[in-house]
Each structure stands twice: as structure tokens, then as C-alpha cells.
Amino acid sequence: RVMSRTGAAAWALTPTSPTASNTSPSSVTDPFTRFGVAHLSATSMLQFRADPALGVLYLVFGIREAGSPAMHRGSALDHTIGQMLDDGVALDHAAARQLATDHYDNLIQETPEEYAPDAVSREREVVGQCLDRCYPVVSEWPTPLAYQHPIRLSLKGIEIPVIGFIDLRYGDAVRELKTSGKPRRGIIDDHAFQVSTYAMAIRQETGEWPQAFVDYITPKGMASFQLKNGKRWVREVVDT
């Protein structure tokens, strides 16, 4: 049975306030502890990679850029695919489509942010289109060992772990699901960095390197790509 995202709160990616620590700053040489940063994530590392100043604001002060309906589109499809692959759940195409749009609606209702109604409607339509494209493919996939599998990666010279969740964890592979408004011809750099982080964590956990895939789901089709230049991306993760 596919594992649900239990215990997600314990893995929340929101950093601790820098004023929350009872440790005297003058006695702490570890900068992460000094500023109340308990862990990193692939997202925070990518943010720092792209813009170090913004990355510091993200990590230390918890400042986030505004969300968008597209973000909830991806979450709704991830959730639906997790349910489709759960061997205890039976979803035909129509039921899966309904689940995806309902979950999207719930996410939009629960967010404190306000979005333009036309943007919400447009992305809701994209949710259905993406589900229609991926359903025939994904419904043939085997049940994974876990959905939203938590990872913990230790990097040499970094005092805190990198944590996150793998969308689909198989015995010999990790898969990251991505939705996009347009088709992709290969894995984009940020996604290669992210899935490499997950593969490295599984290597630490099991002693074996998994295959790493990114699955792009768009309104026009679905394309899956295997990460081929893994050594390069391992170095990128370590160097960041």
C-alpha cells in the first residue's frame, strides 16, 4: 500500500525564527544554529543558487514569494496520482479527474492568498487536461513503495540535513512529477538538481544508486526523462 504523507508537519520546510534559539550567539560557531535554520531543502538550495541574497531571506526569515494557482495545479495532480497508484484505491478515469479538480478547488479555498478568478479557472481547466493526458500512462504503472517518501541527506561540511519528499519511491528508482503549461524536451536544470538530491539521499539510505526520473505532465501530453548525467548533478548539489 502506498504510504500517505503522514508526519508531514514534522518535516515542514519553514525555518525557525532566528530569535527562537536560547543559545547565546557569541557561543555558536555553526551559522545554521546561530540563525535558527534547522535544515535545508532542495528548494532552499536552489533559491540560494539562483540568488544568494534571496536565499538567505528564504532560509533565515522565512520570506516566501507569492504563490500562484499553477502551484496548486501541481499539488492537485500529485495527490491524484498518489491515489491512483495506491493499491487500496480504485479510480477510473472519470473519478480520478473529479478527484483532481476537487482537490485543486480545496487548495484554492484554503490558501490565504487571493488570485484572479480567471487565473484560477484557467488552471482548473489545465488540471483536467493534464489528468486526461497522464491517466492512460500512469494507471499502468506499478504501485510504488511510497508516495511522498521523506528523505534526509547529509552533506560533508554542512551541519544540518537536507530534507524533502520524493513523489514516487520505487525499489530501484525515484520519480518526480512536474506539471507544465508546455511540453519539455528534457529535464530542466532545477529539476535535475532536485531529483539528484533525492537520489543521493536514497544512496545514503540503502547503499544503492536509484535511477532518477522526471515526469512532465502537460495539457498536450506526458513525457518522462531519465537523469543521465548524474555525476555532474551530484557535484552541483555538493558544491552548493
Image (cartoon, helix red, strand yellow):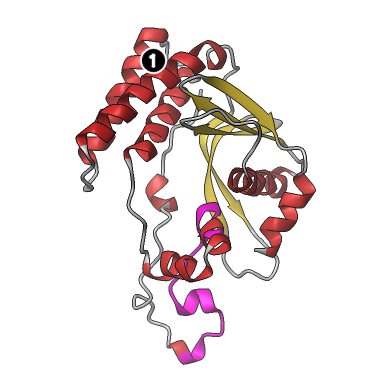
The stretch in magenta equals 26-45
Front residue (pair 188, 192): 188
Question: In the picture provided, is 90 more to the left or to the right than 229?
Answer: left
Q: Position of residue 129 (x, y in %)?
A: 41, 18
Relative to 106, does residue 52 appear above or below in the rendering? Answer: below
Question: In the picture provided, is 158 more to the left or to the right than 103?
Answer: right
Q: Quadrant of the C terminus?
A: bottom right
Q: Position of residue 50 (x, y in %)?
A: 55, 60
Q: Residues within 10 Å of mark 1 (few under 14, many from 20)?
A: many
Q: Which SS class for mark 1?
A: helix
Q: Is residue 31 magenta?
A: yes
Front residue (pair 102, 6): 102
Could you tell me if residue 87 is visible in this image? no
Q: Is residue 134 magenta?
A: no
Report the residue at 67% width, 30% height from top: 225
Report the residue at 37% width, 37% height from top: 70
Question: In the picture provided, is 168 more to the left or to the right than 230?
Answer: left
Query: Residue 159 appears in which quarter of the rendering?
Result: bottom right
Report the residue at 50% width, 90% height from top: 27
Judging by the rendered image, the residue that carries numbered circle 1 is 96
The amino acid on which the numbered mark 1 sits, given as a three-letter code, is: Ala
Report the residue at 51% width, 23% height from top: 1
Relative to 13, does residue 107 appear above or below in the rendering? Answer: above
Could you tell me if residue 18 is visible in this image? yes
